[in-house]
Image (tube, helix red, strand yellow):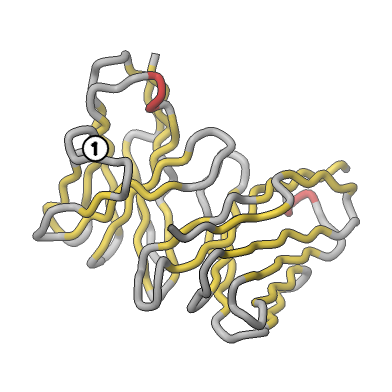
Amino acid sequence: GQQVMQIPQYQHVQEGEDFTTYCNSSTTLSNIQWYKQRPGGHPVFLIQLVKSGEVKKQKRLTFQFGEAKKNSSLHITATQTTDVGTYFCAGPRGFGNEKLTFGTGTRLTIIP
Amino acid sequence: SAVISQKPSRDICQRGTSLTIQCQVDSQVTMMFWYRQQPGQSLTLIATANQGSEATYESGFVIDKFPISRPNLTFSTLTVSNMSPEDSSIYLCSVERQTKEYFGPGTRLTVT
């Protein structure tokens, strides 16, 4: 079945440093979504990318969808303590399928 | 967006007993999803709850263990039956709206 892997599994950074998580799917995706889960919280939708090679920015966050639509990345510039949490990518099981397969997640901790 | 509530928020249960988790959405939705998230892990889809028909279970999950009800378009329940310590987890319901997924706050279950 479809597998969605993320690296790294954990990342510890000093506040102010940059952070990147990479997401790789075993199948081509119609879109990729990113979610953030704060410690003790539930996943919250961040963004959706649809087009091959698409790049979107949200303040210090930059999201990219690969040309082959099988990989994606999330880059945070100048991390802040509010960025702490686990970042998940997720892709639909198939075209027109509402069910998502979530990536393995990257847990980000910030050293003040 | 969607506002989702879950009850209970947490519970500690003895092995062999059952717990029913409730999920309420602020407006009508066609599909509701139930996930399990074990400590430090990603989200695993248990089943999709459809109003007016039987729930659809994912591989590894069966109706006898996780019976689901969906009496109307804003409400669903998930029962964790005959619990064992391996069922200790966070259980989350979610809904899909405009291709985005919105999650409830989760139910943290501990089985002793």
Q: Is residue B87 left or right of residue B40?
A: left
Q: Is residue A101 left or right of residue A8?
A: left
Residue A63's place in the image compared with B86, above or below, is: below
User: From the image, which quarter does the C terminus of chain B lie in?
Assistant: top left
Residue A32 image point, x, y percent = 55, 71
What residue lies at 78% left-to-right and 69% top-to-bottom?
A: A60
User: From the image, which quarter does the N terminus of chain B lie in?
Assistant: bottom left
- Quarter of the image where one finds residue A4: bottom right
Residue B39 image point, x, y percent = 54, 33
Residue B48 image point, x, y percent = 27, 55
Front-lying residue, B64 or B101 = B64
Q: Is residue A74 left or right of residue B79?
A: right
Residue B16's place in the image compared with B90, above or below, is: above
Q: Residue furthest left?
A: B52
Residue A99 image point, x, y percent = 37, 63
Residue placed under numbered mark 1 in the picture: B66
**Total numbered labels placed on residues in the image:** 1
What residue lies at 88% left-to-right and 43% top-to-bottom?
A: A112
Front-lying residue, B89 or A6 = A6
- Kindly state the secondary structure of the residue where label 1 is placed: loop
What residue lies at 58% left-to-right and 61% top-to-bottom?
A: A89
Q: Is residue A35 left or right of residue B18?
A: right
Type of amino acid at the residue the image marks with label 1: Phe
Q: Residues within 10 Å of mark 1 (few under 14, many from 20)?
A: many
Chain for disc number 1: B
